[in-house]
Amino acid sequence: MQRHKAGAPTACSLARMTIHEDVAVGVAAPLPPVADLFREFLGSVHDVTGRVVAQILAGEHAYAESALPDGALDRVVAVNIEALLRSMSGAPDDLRPARDAGRLKAEHGIPLASLLHAYRLAGLALWDEVVTGAASRHRSEELLRASSDVWGIIDRFSNAAADAYRDVVDERDRRSQHSRSLMLVALLDADTPLREAAGILRTLGLTEQGRYLVVSAELDATGDDPLPDVEARLRHRGIRSTWSTWGAEHVGVVACRNDLEVAGAADLVEAAATGRVGISGCIPTVAHIHRGLREARVALECVAPATAGAHAYGAAPVDVLLVAHPEQAAEMRSTVLGALADSPDRGHLLDTLEAWFRADGSTAQAARMLHCHRNTVGYRLGRIEDLTGRSVARPSQAAELYAALRAVRLVAGGAVPGPA
C-alpha cells in the first residue's frame, strides 16, 4: 500500500477543504452527483429564457407596460439563468447579472415585487427542467437532497437584485430630496422673481392661487422628526405641502385653498408636534411667501426651550417682541425683576406669578393650580411687590411683570441670574 508523506493532503481531505472553502465564502453548492444535471442545461438557456419571458409578460403587467428597451428583458433573463445554472453546477456565485437586473428594473420603474416574482418564475422553470431530466435518469432522490442548496442559490441571486434595486431607489430619492430642498430655498428667498417662485410652486405640486403657511420645526440632538407623518396627515385632509431639512431645522410650506384650510392645517401641525415648532401667519399670495420663514422662526422661539409644542406667529405679540429683540428683553427682565433675581425662593415666586396670570387674576384658581392655600398665593404676590416694587393690582405694573416673566421663560434659556 502506498504511504502518503506526513502532511500531504489526501483526496478526502481535499474534498473536505473544498467544502470548507465553499462555506467560508457563503457558497453552498449542490451535491456533486447532481451538478452535472444543471451543467447539461447550459446549452438550453435560450429555450428556458423564452419560456420564462413569456410567463413574466403574461403574469406581470408592469413588464408589458414598462419602457424597457427592445430585447432588454430577454437579455437580462438569459444572463441571469446562465449565471444561476453555473452556480448550481458548482461554480462560485457571479452576482453581477442579478445586480444589473435590479438596477435596470429600478431605473425603468418596474416594482420590486415584480422583480422578485421574475426570479421565482426563473427558478421554477429551471427546477421543472432538471426534475424532468432527473426522473428520466432515475436520479430524483439525489435531486431532492440538493433542493435546499438550489433554492438557496436562487435566494442569493434575488436578494442581490433586490439590494441593487433599493440602492437605485434610495439614490433617486436622495437626488429628488436635494432638488426639492434647493427649490424650497429659492421659493423662500426674497430675491427670487415672482414668475420663478410661481414656477417652483407648480413643480412642487402646490397651488399658485391660495394661502400659505410656512413651518419651522427644531431638530433635537437625536435627529428625530419633530413632525412625524405631517405631510401624510395634511394630504389626508386634501392639503398639499412640501418639506425639507436644513441643518437643525425642518422646514415646510403648506398650500391652502381658503381660510378654513389654513386654520385646519395649523391645528394639524400643532397636534403633530413632538418638539418646538413655529408656524407663520397666513401668507395671502406667493409674492409674500418669503416672509413666512422669518415669521415661522420667530414663532418657534416663542415656545419655551426644552419643551414641545407649536406656536403661531401673532398669537402672542408680547412673546414675538421679546424673542425678536433678546438683548432688550434681557435688559427689561433684569430691570423689572430687580431683587427677585437674588431671592432664594425666586422659583416659587415666578411659578406663582405665572399661575396668577393663567388664572386671569384669580387667587383661588391660582392656588388650585399650585396645590397650595390661597393665602400662600397672596403672600407670594406680596413678596413679589416687595422685591420688584411692582404690584399685580396695577395694570401697567402687572403688564411689566408679565413681560419680564415671559422673558424669563423664553429669552437666553429662561435663566434668571441668581446669587453666586
Image: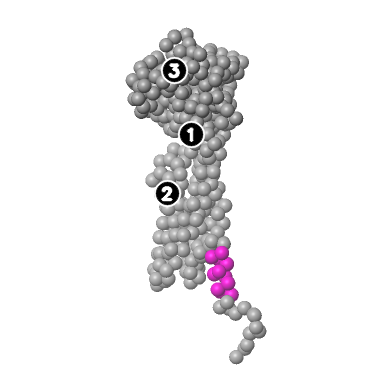
Observer able to see residue 89:
no
Going from the N terminus, do you reach mark 2 or mark 1 first?
A: 2
The crowd level at tag 1 (other Cα within 10 Å; few <14, some 14-19, many 20+) is some
Q: Which mark is residue 164?
A: none
Amino acid type at image mark 3? Gly
Foreground mark, 2 or 1? 1
**Residue 175 x %, y %:** 57, 34
The residue closer to the viewer here, 410 or 107, is 410
Q: Are marks 1 and 3 in contact (CB under 8 Å)?
A: no
Does 134 sit above or below residue 9? above
Observer able to see residue 7:
yes
Residue at 57 percent across and 70 percent down: it is 18
Q: Which mark is residue 382?
A: 3
Image quarter of residue 168: top right
Start-end of magenta stretch:
14-24
Which residue lies under the disc numbered 1?
225
Q: Are marks 2 and 3 in contact (CB under 8 Å)?
A: no
Q: Secondary structure at mark 1?
A: loop
Going from the N terminus, do you reach mark 2 or mark 3 first?
A: 2
Which residue lies under the disc numbered 2?
117
The crowd level at tag 3 (other Cα within 10 Å; few <14, some 14-19, many 20+) is some
Residue at 36 percent across and 27 percent down: it is 372
Q: Secondary structure at mark 2?
A: helix
The crowd level at tag 2 (other Cα within 10 Å; few <14, some 14-19, many 20+) is some
Going from the N terminus, do you reach mark 1 or mark 3 first?
A: 1
